[in-house]
Image: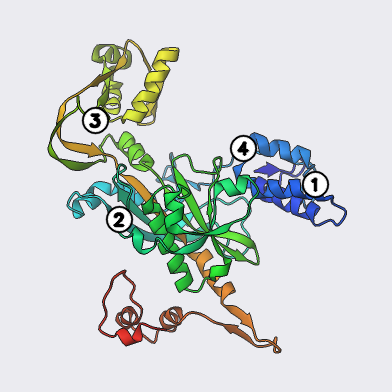
Amino acid sequence: MVKDVKNGECFRADHLLKAHLQKLMSDKKCAAEKRAEMDSVVTQLDNYSQQELAELFVKFNVKSPVTGNDVSPPISFNLMFQTCIGPGGNMPGYLRPETAQGIFLNFKRLLEFNQGKLPFAAAQIGNSFRNEISPRSGLIRVREFTMAEIEHFVDPNDKSHPKFQSLADLELTLYSSKAQTSGQSAHKMKLGDAVEQGVINNSVLGYFIGRIYLYLVKVGVSPDKLRFRQHMDNEMAHYACDCWDAETKTSYGWIEIVGCADRSCYDLTCHARATKVPLVAEKPLKEAISLSRRAMFNVVQFDANKGAIGKAYKKDAKLVMEYLAICDECYITEQERLLNEIGEFTIETEGKTFKLTQDMVSVKRFQKILHVEEIVPNVIEPSFGIGRIMYSIFEHTFHVREGDEQRTVSDLPSIVRDLANGVTTWAEVETKYPIFEGQETGRKEMTEE
């Protein structure tokens, strides 16, 4: 976010820079070399850090579009809506920025529903809230919107989907991060080739990208105005190991309507650390395996000095001990590095901060025989912005009759018309348009449109 230095009006930094550069590029006097440079900046806009954005604002002399005044350097802005909980208003709270966290909190129960087996998935639809700096463009950028999200939990050591081959030959437009940073354009590619060549991280992610494509085309999005753009390194969420956005071309330009991310194990790990409840799945082993023969099963734990911690933190020592007991290997390894380098690290739990030194905690590694392997599942998350999908459908299916501009047509697909008109029941719609993959119907003659 940047501010007008005189009247304090706020603007979203990336949007302001993009609009400014597009205005400069539209000038006929703009040199071809300069236009190419600015076009490269626009293409990689989401990949710039806060400092790099500040340098670009100075380089291209960006001003307030309203007053022409100077603007401040870009600053961070929290998009979550803050509120106060309770009659006294002493407890801060936040409106949810996504629906997904409710699924993660219910992970243990959902795992039980699936008899403790991976993979499994849960879906949720509801309202989300984000404190947008500059709401605009109708349904495109609003502060309250409807999201539909799927959380697909998988074994991190087996990210393969059994039904991926049914979509491997599907050809769609991909805009990889490598293509964006090198100034190349998006190009068509088979889904199977993209996974095999490592453009898409794994076949589970590839499977959902394929299903998203088929769904969007089915409900009326034009295939010629649909692409999947991969997040660049600086743009990628800190928890994701790969992320693709389904984007549609509209009168507002390319807009994101669906996100599909491999969120790794970040969410479950954070909730486990905060609640002190392990959020893991058990993977039965065919036979007891000695860890001395399988290094990947080495156990890494904090070795806490109860006496030193108790002496330092008295009644809060129990909080520290409980926190250390549920930490995962990655976190332990990171804190071990701090112990070795500076001799201490800090933890936060129950709203309190504790400093731990080398005499209070160390790290121990040992081996044992396991009959059950505990794993923290990874999550593949397709996230649908319902309002943006609806807008894209309306714009892509809207036509003006040739030779008669006063008459317009909305050419919605029949499945959307049947549901919107309310003239058919859900049972009839499911018979005519099989919703679930592999669903058999008794009226096959009606499945063709």
Q: Which mark is first along the chain, 3 or 2?
A: 2
Mark 2: secondary structure: strand
Under mark 4, the amino acid is: Ser
> Farthest left residue?
287
- Residue 353 showing in the rendered view: no
Q: Is residue 395 visible?
A: yes
Residue at mark 2 to residue at mark 1: CA–CA distance: 49 Å
Quadrant that contains the C terminus: bottom left
Q: Amino acid type of disc 2?
A: Ala
Label 1 sits on residue: 34
Q: Earlier in the sequence, mark 2 or mark 1?
A: 1
The residue nearer to you, when weighing 58 against 204, is 204
The residue at which mark 2 appears reads as: 121
- Label 4 crowd (10 A; few <14 / some 14-19 / many >=20): few
The answer to whether residue 244 is left or right of residue 155 is right
Mark 3, residue position: 297
Marks 4/2 in contact by CB < 8 Å: the verdict is: no
> What's the residue type where badge 1 is placed?
Lys
Q: Quickly name the residue at label 4.
A: 49
